[in-house]
Amino acid sequence: MTVRRSDGQTVRGAAEAAPQLFLVDVFVVRWTPAGTWEALVMRRASGRSPGSWEAVHGHVEPGERPEETAWREVIEETGLTPERLYNLSRVESFYLHRQGAVALVPAFAAVAGDGAVRLSHEHDAWEWLPLDEARARFSWPRCRRALDDLSTLLGDPAIEDVLLVR
C-alpha cells in the first residue's frame, strides 16, 4: 500500500506502521504484611528475549478487550487468579521493525490472590520483589516507568473508582 504525504511524495508501506493495539503489559503485585507492594518479576526462558526479566506480557486475541487479555494472561503465565485488576492509565508504544508495526501497549496492575506461582513455558524463573528492586530487575524501561505509576496510583483511594477494572 502507498500513502501520499502532504508534500505530494508517496511512501510505500506507511499504513502498515500505523499504531495498533495488540499487546498488553500486566504488573502482578501483592500487598505484604509490612504494608508495602511487591511485584512479580519473571525471566524469559526461550523465544523472544531469552534471559530478560519482565512482567506479564501478552497478545490481544480477536474480539477480546485489552482488560480481558490482561486477566487471561495473568492466569496463563503465572497460574494466579487476580483479586482485582486496575488500569494504570498509561499506554506505551514501540516500533516492531520486523513487522513494520507500531505497538500500543496499555498497562494494567493485577493484585494477586492467594496461591502458588506456576509459570508457563515462556518463563523459567520468578521472584516477588519490593517495587524498587523489581524496577531495577526489569529489563525493559517501559516496565520501570509503569512501576512508578503503579506505586502512585494504587496508593490513592480517591481515584480507585476510575482505575478499578474488576
Image (tube, rainbow, N blue to C red):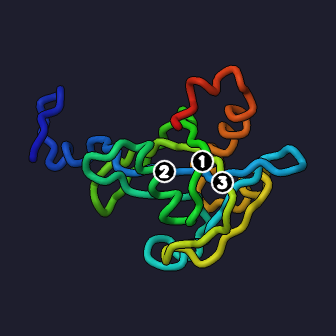
| Residues at discs 3 and 2 in contact (Cβ within 8 Å) | no
Q: Which residue is mark 3?
A: 113
Q: Secondary structure at mark 3?
A: loop
Name the residue type under label 1: Ala
Q: Is residue 92 above or below residue 130?
A: above
- Using the numbered discs, state the Cα–Cα distance from disc 3 to disc 2 in whole angstroms: 12 Å
At x 59% / y 61%, what residue is drawn?
Answer: 80
Residue 52's image quarter?
Answer: bottom right
Residue 76 position in % (x across, y down) = 48, 64
Residue 48 position in % (x across, y down) = 45, 71
Instruction: Give the mark, 3 or 2, whose residue is nearer the N terminus.
Output: 2
- Using the numbered discs, state the Cα–Cα distance from disc 2 to disc 1 in whole angstroms: 8 Å
Q: Residues within 10 Å of mark 3 (few under 14, many from 20)?
A: some
Q: Which residue is mark 2?
A: 71
Name the residue type under label 3: Gly
- Total number of numbered labels? 3
Q: Secondary structure at mark 1?
A: strand
Q: Residues within 10 Å of mark 2 (few under 14, many from 20)?
A: many
Give the farthest residue toward the top: 158
Position of 73 with respect to 16 (left or right) is right
At x 53% / y 76%, what residue is drawn?
Answer: 50
Q: Which mark is residue 132?
A: none
Residue 67 position in % (x across, y down) = 44, 42
At x 36% / y 42%, what residue is drawn?
Answer: 65
Q: Which residue is mark 1?
A: 110
Residue 40's image quarter?
Answer: bottom right
At x 62% / y 67%, what residue is drawn?
Answer: 42
Residue 91 position in % (x across, y down) = 48, 38
Pick the front one: 6 or 111: 111
